[in-house]
Structure formats: C-alpha cells, structure tokens
Image (tube, rainbow, N blue to C red):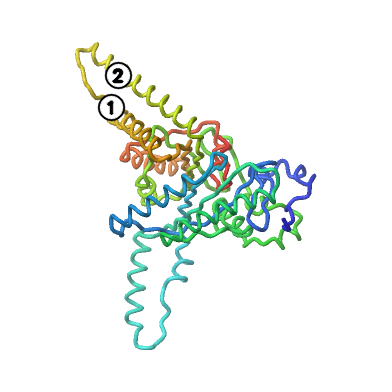
Amino acid sequence: MTNKKEEVKGKKEEVLPSTANTLSYQALYQNGLMQVKEDYFSQSYLLGDVNYQTVGLEDKGAIIEKYSDLINSLDDQTNFQLTIFNKRLNLEKFRQSVLYEEKEDGYDSYRKELNRMMNQNLDSGENNFSAVKLITFGRKDSNPKQAYRSLSQIGEYFKSGFSEIDARFESLAGENRVNLLADMLRGEHHLPFSYRDLTRSGQTTRHFIAPNLLDFKNKNYLQINDRLLQIVYVRDYGMELGDQFIRDLMQGDLELIVSLHAQSSTKADAMKKLRTKKTLMESQKIGEQQKLARTGIYLEKVGHVLESNIDEAEELLKTMTETGDKLFQTVFLIGVFGQDEEELKQALDTIQQVAGSNDLMIDKLPYMQEAAFNSLLPFGCDFL
C-alpha cells in the first residue's frame, strides 16, 4: 500500500493524557482504511436513502430481500456496523444553502412563496435534522495492504447490490472519515481536515477529531466539551429487529448517534445458540405458568413479548434450515446528546417511550461509557 501511515512509531506515547488518546484506533490512512488494533482494520461507506415507504409491495419486498442477501454474504470474521448520525442543522447556514435567490426574471413571486414555506417549516421545527448513514466493515488481518484488499472486495459487493435498488454507496477516503468523525464530536467547531495539515502539525488524525474535553467521571454519561452524551443499549428485542424503531427515533427531534453491530456465527454455532435460547425462553414460560398456577390461574400463553420471541425463534430455526440464512450476534447502541442533565433525562425518556411503543427495552451502561463511546463511533469494532 502506497499511503503513508499517519503516525511514526514512538510518537503515540507522547500524547498519553490527551483526549485524543481516548479514541481507540491506531492509524487512519489516506485511502480511508483505519487500523483499529495491530491486527484489526475497518473501512467506512456512506449509504444513501432508499425510501421504500413510497414504493409498492413488490418493490418493497425486493429491497428487503436485497438487504438480507447482502448481510448474509458476510462471513463470520467480518463485523458489520450501521451508524446513523441524526445531527441538528445550523439553521442560518442551511437557509443560505436552500433558499432561492431572487433574480427579477418574472418568477420571483414563486421563489418567495417557496422560501416562505421552507422558512415556516424551519421555524416550526420540521426538517431541522439531517441523518447521515454509514456502513463500516471491520475484520482481523495480518497487514494493512491485505486488509484494504479484503475490505474493498466486501465494499464492492455491497456497492453492486445497492445499485440494484438505486441506493448510493460510496467509500469514504481518510479525509472524509476524519471530517465526519469531527462533526460527530466537535459539531461545527472544527476546520476542514486535510493530510497536508497532518504533515505540517506533526499530530495524528485523532487530534483533529477529538474535542477539547472528554470527561467520563459520571458513571452513566460523558461530557464532550460543553455537552453531555449518554449511551444506552437496546435489550430484549426479538430475533428479527425491523427498522420501524429507528425511523421513530429519527422523528423524535433528538440529536443522537445510533450504532448497530452485527457479526454472523457459523451455521452450526448459530443453530446451537438458537436452540439453547429457545429452550431457555420455553423454561421461562413454564416458570411463569407455574407461578400463575399457584394462584389458581392457568394460562396457555403468558407475556406477549415472550410468546412472540419463542415463535420467532421457531420460525428462524426453520428458515435457517431451509434457506441457509445466518444468525447474527448484535449490539444495538444509542448515544443521545443534551446540554445538561435535565435535557439528557428528557431525551432518554423520549427514547424509552419510543422503545416501549415498539416492544423494546432500553438499559443503561453504568461504568462502561468509554467502551460504549468507542463502540458507538464508526470504527467498525465492538469494544463492549
């Protein structure tokens, strides 16, 4: 690989106490390859929108099937990470980019009306967020050159698949990846990054991404400059997690980062784990029935979520046997921003309400915020 590594060996130890050291990766190359650990690498891709809400049932089925085929193409050595950054727009900057300039050509009355409607939407809080979607692949490899080749092959396969459903899928170069990470952690308080800056400064890409302050003193959240970020996880969800929950979250008027990690198991391991989980859930069901029986009540079916999960496990076992679909180990993280503890609490309440309406449970990650923070960011690695 012709790209030079961003750090010189021995220089990393000189920045030990800095916030930059909190970012758990070693190097980020100009071609976008990130060296997360000595033998672990990742590559990120920007994912465009596929609005299957407005297409017919046949097209919707084809889109969902394509997603399933792509995910199932990954081997058990590859970590798949979907990251969605729902960022609040700078309204004045956004206005300048979308409002129509008057040209005195006889059409200004139409421009004024369109501008009025857009300003009204902005002032009422509609469309004040922009969602950036990323897919990051991570895997172990012996060296950067081999890792780049392997990850690029995966990316090309996904790009070809997404092109069939008219979805944009673009590899992020190193500069794009640094700037996007800086957007997440520093908002608009950073200058555009280039590798020329890196050469002149003698620093690492982490210095351009890291905020001035990262504080993990509180067990349930961290402080990033003058804002707070709390990372929670989704637990007790079914065997298949649809995207309705994510769509509902994006409508919650919250600035947040969502990351879903998924890694497949070998078919033998997957079937064994699934049968074990089904047996445990059936044992739990019997336990619930026995408790009720002692009070004189007998119900063939107990909690809706438990019954649904047992049925899903049975259906999934059948599907995996017939189609060869894979079972994925998943970690679903949500990081929500707030200006203070009160705003953070309100945001978390909103997330829990949205989760509840989708039959999901949200749980905190006390004393694990630093590992959760690095897992939330699109590094392609689950540190939890």
Classify mark 2: residues with Cα within 10 Å, few (<14), some (14-19) or many (20+). some
Name the one closer to the observer, 177 or 138: 138
Q: Residue at x 50, y 38 (%)?
A: 264
Give the SS element for disc 1. loop
Residue 262 % position (x, y): 49, 41
Reading the image, the residue beneath label 1 is 303
Q: Residue at x 52, y 54 (%)?
A: 157
Q: Quadrant of the N terminus?
A: bottom right
Q: Is residue 384 above or below residue 54?
A: above
Residue 291 % position (x, y): 28, 14
Residue 140 % position (x, y): 63, 41
Q: Residue furthest top?
A: 294
Residue 215 % position (x, y): 60, 40
Q: Residue 197 lies in what quarter of the image?
A: bottom right
Marks 1/2 in contact by CB < 8 Å: the verdict is yes
Q: On the rendered structure, is 138 left or right of 289?
A: right
Q: Residue at x 76, y 42 (%)?
A: 13
Gap in Å between the C-alphas at discs 1 and 2? 9 Å
- Give, as a three-letter code, the residue at label 2: Glu
Q: Residue 350 lies in what quarter of the image?
A: top left
- Give, as a three-letter code, the residue at label 1: Gly
Q: Earlier in the sequence, mark 1 or mark 2?
A: 2
Reading the image, the residue beneath label 2 is 288
